[in-house]
Amino acid sequence: MSEPLVLVGNAGAVRTLSLNRPAALNSFTSELHAELLAALEAAAADAEVRCVVLTGAGRAFCAGQDLADPMVAPDTTPGAAPKDLGHVIEKLYGPLVQRIRSMPVPVVAAVNGVAAGAGANLALCCDLVLAARSASFIQAFTKIGLVPDTGGTWLLPRLVGPARALGIAMLGDKLPAEEAARIGLIWQVVDDAALADAAAALAGRLAAMPSRALVATRAAMNAAQTMDLDTALAEEARLQRELGAANDYREGVEAFRAKRAPVFKDR
Ligand code: T3D
């Protein structure tokens, strides 16, 4: 039997998904897409899962699209029709980003090595991005005549502002993890040897927090990017009304008043 393309691990309420095509730096084929989407669906549907960690097996996080995959590799036969890359984005990368951004629990990227092309933006679309000191981020798209995809055009200017976003995307230079953290592209950098433990600790902490509030915070911040202040304030009121009626709020306040640790259960 062939190895799974996504390794699934559980530790308490944390589900770790490891991209597993190390010989090709975990680059995406349609099979990897299918396994990753199925693993994310399973995590979303499992009430025991309260945080997901996404990482890569071997020395890379993910090198983006597998450029040798016949689905995308240009056919050099004279007169051959071009590959429809738009279809690939619509059917595979777009749904993957939407799945991650709508997960009912927080998603942490533990970037263990190079994250290039769609691999970089896969990491950046997670809620918190933790990277090993030797890791790097490369918007490799323009080097092969493409634009940033997997949410890159949306994410980059929001994360680092338009000037830096354009520099990073147009030049496609390797951005070391420490520089990525310094400019606010990612959350934190840790020593390589500490990455797994740091990701487990961060995910464990998030798993013990009120999932619905975390997910609503993600959604509200995304939505607020295109709202005026009045609309954002109204949206905060709507969310607070909803969350204030949920069990986690009652539990949080009771635990605070009783000077004990809260036990959050809503999802
Ligand atoms: O096309 C569409 O469908 C549209 C969607 C596009 C989404 C995208 O992601 S476009 C961008 C695609 N990705 C890239 O352009 C990155 C290509 N890779 C690299 O630039 C470099 O490999 C890295 C900077 C990521 C790492 O460099 P390095 O020197 O550490 O490793 P390497 O020697 O280049 O690669 C190691 C092996 O992985 C090598 O295979 P080999 O020679 O040992 O058999 C290499 O061919 C393979 N590999 C790396 N990236 C890819 C890949 N194989 C297929 N596809 C890759 N993207």
Image (tube, rainbow, N blue to C red):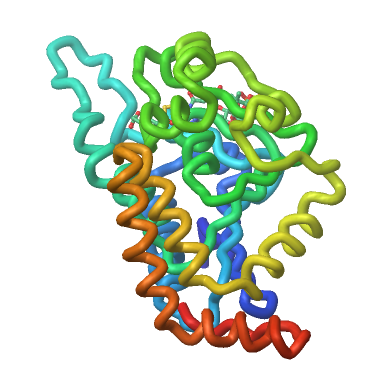
* Residue for point 15% across, 18% down: 80
86 up-or-down from 265: above or below = above
Q: Nearer the viewer, residue 180 or 18?
A: 180
Q: Position of residue 54 (x, y in %)?
A: 58, 55
* Residue for point 47% across, 28% down: 156
The answer to which image quadrant residue 9 occupies is bottom right
* Residue for point 53% across, 61% down: 106
Q: Nearer the viewer, residue 115 or 71?
A: 115
Q: Position of residue 85 (x, y in %)?
A: 25, 30
Q: Position of residue 264 (x, y in %)?
A: 59, 82
Q: Is residue 149 left or right of residue 167?
A: left
Q: Position of residue 99 (x, y in %)?
A: 36, 57
47 up-or-down from 139: above or below = below
262 up-or-down from 72: above or below = below
Q: Nearer the viewer, residue 220 or 86?
A: 220
Q: Nearer the viewer, residue 233 or 162?
A: 233
| Count of numbered circles in the view | 0
The answer to which image quadrant residue 146 occupies is top left
Q: Is residue 30 in view?
A: no
Q: Is residue 107 in view?
A: yes
* Residue for point 51% across, 11% down: 167
95 up-or-down from 150: above or below = below
The answer to which image quadrant residue 258 occupies is bottom right
